[in-house]
Amino acid sequence: MATDAAEADDARDFAGKLGIGGAEFETLLKTPEDQIEKEDDMPVPKTMKKAWHKWCLKGHPDKGGKNEDFMAMKTRYETFKAWFKAQREAPATRAKMQVQQKAQAQQLGDKKLEEGKKALEGQQYERAQVFAEEAINAYETYKSLQLNKKDAEKMVLEAKSLKKMAEEQIRQRELEIRQREDENRQKEEYEEMHRGLNALFYTVRSAVGVVGDGLAITRKIEILRCNFDADKVSFSFCLV
């Protein structure tokens, strides 16, 4: 982060002006607790406080220093103490945040997993799929923060299993829809052909009558019409 880097550079520069630089500055954050004092509830390494007092012997207005220079340095000293306190507390703060994030991730995963199961039971497969994906993402976040990866992996696998079941149900439903569409199309084709046979029968009977060869032709058509198989989508016949 740019801001953190800038604050660290400013702290390093200020310490350098007090004669604390290089490796000595880098060890400030590792200062033991018994080598830290409190100033207005702000922790300060004894080495830094000593260096500051030494500078004040020359830079304080009572010692001949310029007031504006002293006030500027005093402000930087207070800024340094705030930076030092934040850096000292950073590991504990990060650990606390990690615990909170882990708990939130697990709670979100559990919530989405439960919602997904209910959606699956209610045959709301698309919603179940979405909830499962959200649960997976939450559990993956929990896994990244969890020391016991095996425990976290079980949560991820359960969410993935729910997603798989939802996807299978969606595919099954799509297959059933296509099958119904095929059946309806076949039924429509059959009804269309049946109407054609009826029309042909009545047309031939009207044209040739019901005697002689005409009777034989219409009887063949009538038999074909009556024996028409609804399961067949195509057929052929020959009139002789």
Image (tube, grey):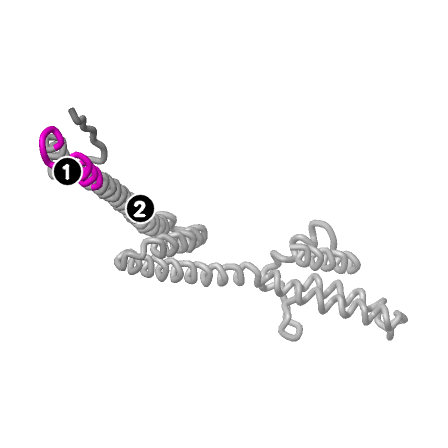
Few, some or many residues within 10 Å of mark 1 (<14, 14–19, 20+)? some
- Badge 1 element: helix
Relative to 174, 99 lies left or right: right
- Image location of residue 24, percent across then percent down: 70, 53
Relative to 86, 190 lies left or right: left
Q: What residue is shown with label 1?
A: 225
- Image location of residue 105, percent across then percent down: 42, 59
Secondary structure character of the magenta stretch overall: helix
| Residue 215 shown in magenta | no
Q: Nearer the viewer, residue 110 or 57?
A: 110
Q: Quadrant location of residue 236? A: top left
Tag in front: 2 or 1: 1
Name the amino acid, label 2: Glu
| Residue 204 shown in magenta | yes
Taking the spot 35% from the left edge, 54% from the top edge, the residue there is: 126
Asked whether the viewer can see residue 152, the reply is: yes
The answer to whether the residue labelled 2 contacts the one labelled 1, judged by CB atoms less than 8 Å apart, is no
Q: Nearer the viewer, residue 54 or 214?
A: 214
Relative to 75, 130 lies left or right: left
Relative to 176, 134 lies left or right: right
Q: What residue is shown with label 2?
A: 174
Q: CA distance from mark 2 to mark 1?
A: 35 Å
Above or below, 52 against 201 in this view is below
Q: Quadrant location of residue 58? A: bottom right
Magenta range: 199-214
Name the amino acid, label 1: Arg
